């Protein structure tokens, strides 16, 4: 195989958006915004209680020889030790963007987070925003349901993709874990993250070719 053949082999793998389109088609088939919200807000649908290493081993989900984890990719956490462009962020929730294998103590110095924005009854154009998020069409935000300890006026949450947040891994490991993404929630999160980081168009293909 030469480099040209390698590019052809990677063409439908490295920049493919089929997974994201599957998510959008599924959401579209659920009906109107209210029905979509009921499905995605159901307990354990997108977010579940934090996954625990010892519980996972005891249940047989993983082997005891696997790396002990205290955090997973997609975990929802709160911490005052995260920074954006050198500015410390306080009083916020985040989703862990780094791969789980990079969250093992001592394996990396830093980790990446994404901010979570609460959507409340007072959010401007809240109905339109929820409708857009629940179609999974946005390249700026990802829908999440209300989280434990959210105020009563919280209708939903949005993961913000604009701005990667930096944090020292040893400080992140001390963060308060609020929840973990469910299996399908993690699949959706991973599909959209991959699409956003590697999106392209026919023009860029021609440019690089």
Image (cartoon, helix red, strand yellow):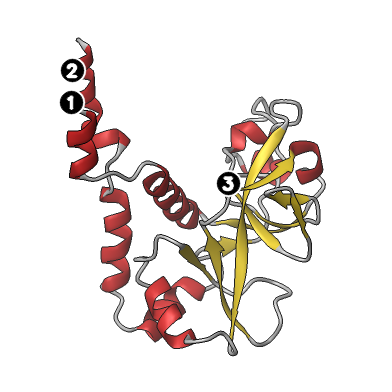
Helix, strand or loop at mark 2 = helix
Residue in the picture at 79% in, 51% down: 175
C-beta proximity under 8 Å, tags 1 and 3: no
Helix, strand or loop at mark 3 = loop
Residue in the picture at 19% in, 43% down: 203
Left or right, 83 with respect to 122, comes to right
Q: Quadrant of the C terminus?
A: top left
- Give whichever of discs 1 and 3 has the lower sequence position: 1
Q: In this view, which residue lies farthest toward the top? A: 1
C-beta proximity under 8 Å, tags 2 and 1: yes
Foreground disc of the pair 2, 3: 2
- Measure the alpha-carbon separation of dots 2 and 3: 32 Å
Residue 112 placement (x, y as % from top left): 63, 43
- Measure the alpha-carbon separation of dots 2 and 1: 6 Å
Residue in the picture at 74% in, 38% down: 169
- Near-viewer residue (76 or 41): 76
Left or right, 186 with respect to 176, comes to left
Q: Residues within 10 Å of mark 1 (few under 14, many from 20)?
A: few
For disc 2, the marked residue is 4
Residue in the picture at 81% in, 43% down: 171
Any mark on residue 154, and which?
Answer: none
- Measure the alpha-carbon separation of dots 1 and 3: 29 Å
- Near-viewer residue (164 or 43): 164
Residue 145 placement (x, y as % from top left): 55, 72
Any mark on residue 97, and which?
Answer: 3
Left or right, 119 with respect to 69, comes to left
The quarter of the picture where residue 12 lies is top left
- Near-viewer residue (136 or 115): 115
For disc 1, the marked residue is 8
Relative to residue 97, is residue 184 depicted above or below? Answer: below
Helix, strand or loop at mark 1 = helix
Q: Residues within 10 Å of mark 2 (few under 14, many from 20)?
A: few
């Amino acid at each position: 195989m030469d480099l040209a053949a390698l590019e052809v082999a990677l063409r439908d793998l490295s920049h493919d958006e089929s997974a994201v389109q599957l998510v959008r088609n599924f959401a579209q088939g659920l009906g109107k915004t209210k029905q979509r919200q009921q499905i995605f807000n159901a307990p354990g649908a997108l977010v579940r209680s934090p996954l625990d290493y010892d519980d996972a081993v005891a249940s047989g989900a993983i082997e005891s020889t696997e790396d002990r984890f205290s955090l997973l990719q997609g975990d929802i956490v709160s911490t005052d030790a995260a920074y954006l462009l050198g500015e410390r962020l306080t009083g916020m929730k985040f989703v862990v963007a780094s791969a789980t294998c990079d969250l093992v103590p001592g394996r990396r110095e830093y980790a990446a987070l994404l901010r979570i924005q609460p959507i409340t009854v007072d959010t401007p154009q809240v109905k339109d925003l929820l409708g857009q998020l629940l179609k999974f069409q946005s390249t700026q935000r990802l829908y999440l349901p209300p989280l434990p300890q959210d105020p009563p006026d919280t209708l939903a949450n949005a993961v913000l993709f604009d701005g990667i947040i930096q944090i020292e891994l040893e400080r992140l490991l001390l963060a308060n874990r609020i929840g973990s993404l469910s299996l399908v929630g993690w699949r959706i999160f991973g599909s959209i993250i991959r699409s956003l980081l590697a999106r392209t168009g026919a023009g860029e293909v021609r440019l690089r070719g």
